[in-house]
Amino acid sequence: MTRLLSRQDRPMLLAPAGSLSAARAAMHAGADAIYVGLKGWSRGGAKGELTFEDLLDAMAIAHGQGRELQVALNTIPGPSERRYVLQRVADLIDSGVDGVIVNDVGLMVELRSLYPELCLTASIGCAVMNEADVVFYRDLGADAVVLPGTLSPDELRAAAQVQDVVIEVMIHMVEEFILLGKCWMPSYHRLNPTPLAELQGQGNRLVGSMKRGGAGVCFKICEQPWVLSRNGQVVAQRLLPSRQISPIDTVSDILDAGVDVVKLQGRSLSPDLLAPLVRRYRSAIDAWVEGGVVTVTQGLPFGRSWTVSRR
């Protein structure tokens, strides 16, 4: 295993997988690499996490096809949990993992010190928004950083000028009410402590997406109806702003800006939904690489199509 210190010859398509069947579907559809969540240490929650045994199976499938597998460890462990997550990282390295995705600054620094050759990615939850943020996480030891797909091509181009770090863009994602990966809303809604198996009865973890002491699980509270009351009387219900972003029509602009990895969100997606999503972006990236033109129509809403070409 070697650290990723130089950019790839061609853009990489990084797809999510919340199950073994999803991992197979993503790779069959053309993903260069997949990322999975490890049960208990990922924001994905029960629907988007793999047991360690399933993770090993997914890794074997990926490596057997010449693909890469990354593991999301994007929660912030409490003091009693830290040695358990460090042991899990050691187990992953022994198993041949290609890299880990982390959200905890302290954990990133510690992992870099302990494992100089381990590929580390600063998660979308680190809220990297500009080139200064990219430099900050690179200097902490990150080999790659994930930027949101809401940034403009000019903003991405500035970030891509930073040397010795790989730029990933979460191009397909849900734009949350507040910063992606930084939501604290579910912490009061699901404030139920649950046992963490690896603590062997020595401690509980709060279920919610708060970071310190929270499991990092997203319950999509921002997408639920909120009740407006006046003088104790319900007057209306409202939804907070939230929309799905999937700008496949701007793939050329994003890649022209120097982005190295096109990343898709969706570890909760079923194989049937994930496969066409991966295929669409595979076609768009290949068209850009080849300098040709491709019309992407499969599975798009309302029958729309886009033409993607390299400039």
Image: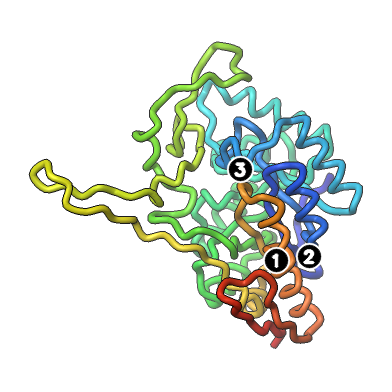
Q: Is residue 261 visible?
A: no
Q: Is the C terminus in the top left, top right, bottom left or bottom right quadrant?
A: bottom right
Check disc 1: other Cα within 10 Å, few if <14, some if 14-19, many if 20+: many
User: In this rendering, would 103 be left or right of 175?
Assistant: right
Where does label 2 land, which residue? 8
C-alpha separation, residue under disc 2 versus residue under disc 1: 7 Å
First in residue order: circle 2 vs circle 3: 2
Q: Residue furthest front?
A: 302
Report the amino acid beneath label 3. Val
Q: Quadrant of residue 88?
A: top right
Measured from the top left, where is residue 35 in percent x and y? 70, 48
C-alpha separation, residue under disc 3 versus residue under disc 1: 19 Å
Where does label 3 land, which residue? 102
First in residue order: circle 2 vs circle 1: 2
Q: Is residue 102 visible?
A: yes
Report the amino acid beneath label 1. Asp
Please say if 247 is above or below 198.
below
Asked if the residues shown at circle 2 and circle 1 are in contact, with their CB atoms under 8 angstroms apart, the answer is yes
Q: Residue at x 77, y 47 (%)?
A: 69
Report the amino acid beneath label 2. Gln
Q: Is the N terminus in the top left, top right, bottom left or bottom right quadrant?
A: top right
Q: Say what secondary structure mark 2 lies in.
A: loop
